[in-house]
Structures are given as structure tokens and as C-alpha cells.
Image (cartoon, grey):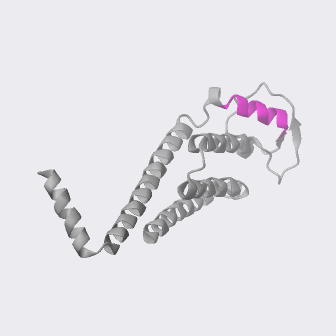
Amino acid sequence: MSHFAEFMHELISMSQGQLHDTFTKTYGVLYKRNAMLFVEYFRELRSFYRKGNVNLQEFTSAFFATLYQKMFQVNSLTPPVVVMSTRYVTDRLMLQVMNPQYTLDSSYLSCVTRHMRQQQPFKEVPSKVAASVKRSMVATRVLVKALRSGYKIAEEMRAVSVPLCYFFTRLALAKLH
């Protein structure tokens, strides 16, 4: 049983490592500065796997909202110019990369988050990711519970003496006919 749990933790870690490698190559410093956001997401996935106490749909939505905000936050290596306007929510997602000279205040970032659902910067990716992750994690948790139950039943059956086990098997077979 513990081998399967180890295998699942290994799969989650491998997924996290592959994402980290891909995003480091693709987005470089921009990803590295915000990597903790992804680390936290995978930490919550592990928590859900262990305890089931995380609402994956809500957490994935919050993850993408935070990611969207991070895309608008200032590049700390450049001198800031404050942008106070909140009416230009439709600015392209790569504002930070293409215009790192801007510093966006908290009201702008709040506005960005409020309008995220309308703008759909990630299209249907957040809902698809949430549904896919939830489906696979719930199925995995059900499988783990079933394996644990099966293991307990097998252990109890081993503890039963042979004549008693033989009696119950014959009784069960008799009921089937």
C-alpha cells in the first residue's frame, strides 16, 4: 500500500519538476520570481491527495487569478512609473514583459482580478485544469481507499482460522445457488 502512495507522490513531484523545467526555459527570470506560486499549487495538490480537505476548483481559480495579477505586477529591476488608471483592464497579458517600466497600484490589480472572468485571459484553461485535476485526484483517492480496505480485509481473512474460513466460504457458495 505504501508503495502506491510513494508512487503517487513521485508522480506529483515529477509533474512539478517538468513544469518547473519547462517554465524556467520558456519564461526564465519572470517564472523564477513567481515560482513559489506554482510550488504552493503543488503543495495543495499533495494536501488534497493526503487529506482531501482542499476545494480544488476554488484553489485552481484562485491560482489563476493570482497568476493573472502577477503578470501585471512590476518588474523590480526597472525604475517604476506609477499607472493609476483602472479603465485599461484589456491590456495584454504580457504587459510586464513588454512594458516593465510600469508599476501598477493595488487598485489596478484588483480591477484586473475583478474583470478576469470577462477578459478570459487564459480562455477555458483554468476550468479545464480544475476539472481534470479534480477528476484524477478524486479517482486516485478513491482507489487508495479501496486498496486500503482490500488490504485490511485480506489481513482479517488471514487471521481467521482455516476451518472457520472454509465454513463461511461454503455458506457463501450455498447462498449463490
Q: In which quarter of the image is residue 73?
A: top right
Q: Where is residue 133 in the image (x, y as percent from the top left)?
A: 50, 48
Q: Which residue is drawn at 88% across and 45% down?
A: 80
Q: Which residue is drawn at 60% across and 50% down?
A: 53
Q: Quadrant of residue 21?
A: bottom right
- In depth, the one of 151 and 124 nearer the eye is 151
Q: Residue at x 24, y 69 (%)?
A: 165
Residue 108 lies, with reference to residue 12, above or below; the image says above
Q: Does residue 98 appear in this view?
A: no
- Relative placement, left or right, of 43 versus 5 is right
Q: Chief secondary structure of the magenta span?
A: helix
- In depth, the one of 21 and 161 nearer the eye is 161
Q: Is residue 12 covered in magenta?
A: no
Residue 174 lies, with reference to residue 83, above or below; the image says below
Residue 91 lies, with reference to residue 5, above or below; the image says above
Where, quadrant-wise, is the N terminus in this rendering?
A: bottom left
Q: Does residue 142 appear in this view?
A: yes
- Relative placement, left or right, of 129 versus 139 is right
- Relative placement, left or right, of 21 versus 152 is right
Q: Position of residue 106 (x, y in %)?
A: 84, 37
- Relative placement, left or right, of 170 versus 31 is left
- In depth, the one of 171 and 19 nearer the eye is 171
Q: Position of residue 141 (x, y in %)?
A: 47, 54
Q: Residue furthest left?
A: 177
Span highlighted in magenta in the image: 104-116
